[in-house]
Image (cartoon, helix red, strand yellow):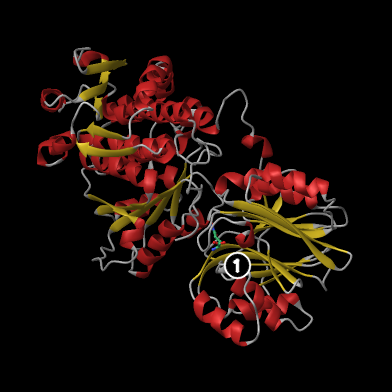
Amino acid sequence: MCGIVGAVAQRNIASILVEGLRRLEYRGYDSCGVAVLADGALRRARSVARVADLDAQVRESDLDGVTGISHTRWATHGAPVTDNAHPIFSRDTVALVHNGIIENYESLREMLRGKGYEFASQTDTEVVTHLIHSLYRGDLYAAVREAVKQLHGAYAIAVIHKDQPHTVVGARAGSPLVVGLGEGENFLASDALALAGSTERFIFLEEGDVCELSLNGVRIADRDGNDAVREVRTVVAYGGAVELGPYRHFMQKEIFEQPRAIADTIPQAEAFDATLFGEKAAEAFAGIDSLLILACGTSYYSGLTAKYWLESIAKIPTQVEIASEYRYRDSVPNPKALVVVISQSGETADTLAALKHAQSLGHRHTLSICNVGTSAMVRLTELAFLTHAGREIGVASTKAFTTQLVALFVLAVTLGKMRGHVDAAQEAGYIKQLRHLPAALNSVLALEPQIIAWSEEFSRKENALFLGRGLHYPIALEGALKLKEISYIHAEAYPAGELKHGPLALVTEAMPVVTVAPNDALLEKLKSNIQEVRARGGQLYVFADADTRIVNDEGIHVIRMPEHYGLLSPILHVVPLQLLAYHTACARGTDVDKPRNLAKSVTVE
Ligand code: HGA
């Protein structure tokens, strides 16, 4: 969420600052802005439209400079209006951009008002700007180090001062920030992607770090104020990953990338063993008696699906919990539980906090399932399995979800084998099925024209129910979430057996009921649930495996899936639900890749 870019160079950096924002825009798009130092003064452009509009402003006003910062915002405090857009100024002297939330901003604001500071925005961010201004004694690096001692909450910031024309200072705690190293120029960003093309050498700042970028070097102080030396890593962040290609939206592109993403995520090994999860995994897995999965949103649904696999394949008790709940409740820690955290970005604030909470309670064994190898989450866990979805730009997650499912399935088979519940023949069967998945997915993607026909009808609805059973109940949840997120149609998912306990009261002609109907052990039960809906006049839209013998009938619309795919069926069944949400949103004319009020990589609490 929010994108930060900063640069100090000997050339005009306005285009680097704006191009960086363009690449990060999917992280937050309530407003954007840029500030540069030119001839001893701060100049700024801000927009509540998209980065393209900011770019035009920058060009028209010839805003250029050798030192500057920029930001794309996902508002937490204060409406998405120009006054609240970053960079935020203090007395035309200090300019600052911020990602995160300053929890003690109210008391700081009172203190700063007492010192005569006037507030021009409703943001929590503005207190940081004035605080740094109030502490400045000719050294911005020192002022920021003093200021952060007074901040509670999460932040990544980048700051410039009009009297230090070749300095950018950054700080992070709880939100990511990287330093990009150049020749005679240096950069700062909330994600290395923003700097693709400018540098490939990065320092990933650690919690509590404050850094000072000048033309010829970078200084870093750790959370205790001591000089710190951090590892320089080479990361080839490919800016081209954010190109749309022939697709209409990134979400569509990412749905269609799933066969490739899944093929890249499936381990090449002929047999699965613990080392797939890290060097210490064999030892860690040998000592566990259960799993505790912590995640948010779509990743939480991948965890819910995995519970079915882990308990049936590996026979290991598995608890799945929403990270933002777990972190604040009293739980009973079991040091023998493996804590599995799942996040696309590896920077999800609630999941990171839940992980740290679990570690503070004595959980020793932790595993990340993550799409970003350099993320805070991967660095914090003992073990990691990286998905290879590639960068996901659409706010509504698709390929990250299905690759997480692949990772979790591999985990279930690996643990099942170690615990003596999967023999060599079964393992070979699972691996064969996994390898065939990309081809099976292609045949599901070929159903798109039929789904487009349904989406026309869905686009005129305001509510929808999603039903699934067993392993496919989390898939129904994910389908409902997708529809909510991008089409703004209210959707709820239920395990089909729950209908009669309440939601059946909602069923009328106006309520489409999407049903996930695999040919599994619960099929006959599900067929009864379908009849219960039909008897009340409900309209059913059923994704039925070819071998279910569910056919089109009055009030029952069927799209025929391939034959049942066994335990991996959820990975196939979620894809038509993604397409249904996508095309319904297109038919309603929403901004599919940037749905209202949301943003990618939820780095605030
Ligand atoms: N709290 C600040 C920054 C918001 C943010 O980090 N979003 O991801 C604001 O509301 O401007």
Give ligand 1's quarter of the image: bottom right
Instruction: Compare residues 471 and 477 and report the one nearer the observer.
Output: 477
Q: Quadrant of residue 142?
A: bottom right
Instruction: Compare residues 431 and 332 and report the one nearer the observer.
Output: 332
User: In this rendering, would 93 be left or right of 77?
Assistant: right
Dot 1 beta carbon under 8 Å from ligand 1: yes
Residue at x 65% of width, y 52% of height = 32
User: In this rendering, would 373 be left or right of 477?
Assistant: right
Q: Residue furthest bottom?
A: 114
SS for dot 1 = loop
Instruction: Compare residues 40 and 237 and report the one nearer the observer.
Output: 40
61 up-or-down from 488: above or below: below
User: In this rendering, would 436 be left or right of 133?
Assistant: left
Q: Position of residue 271 (x, y in %)?
A: 38, 32
Q: Quadrant of residue 529?
A: top left
Residue 178 visible (yes or no): yes
Residue 5 visible (yes or no): no
553 up-or-down from 309: above or below: above
Given the image, on which type of amino acid does mark 1 rest?
A: Ser
Residue labelled with disc 1:
121
Q: Position of residue 433 (x, y in %)?
A: 35, 24
Q: Position of residue 99 (x, y in %)?
A: 57, 61
432 up-or-down from 377: above or below: above
Q: Position of residue 129 (x, y in %)?
A: 65, 72
Residue at x 79% of width, y 51% of height = 14
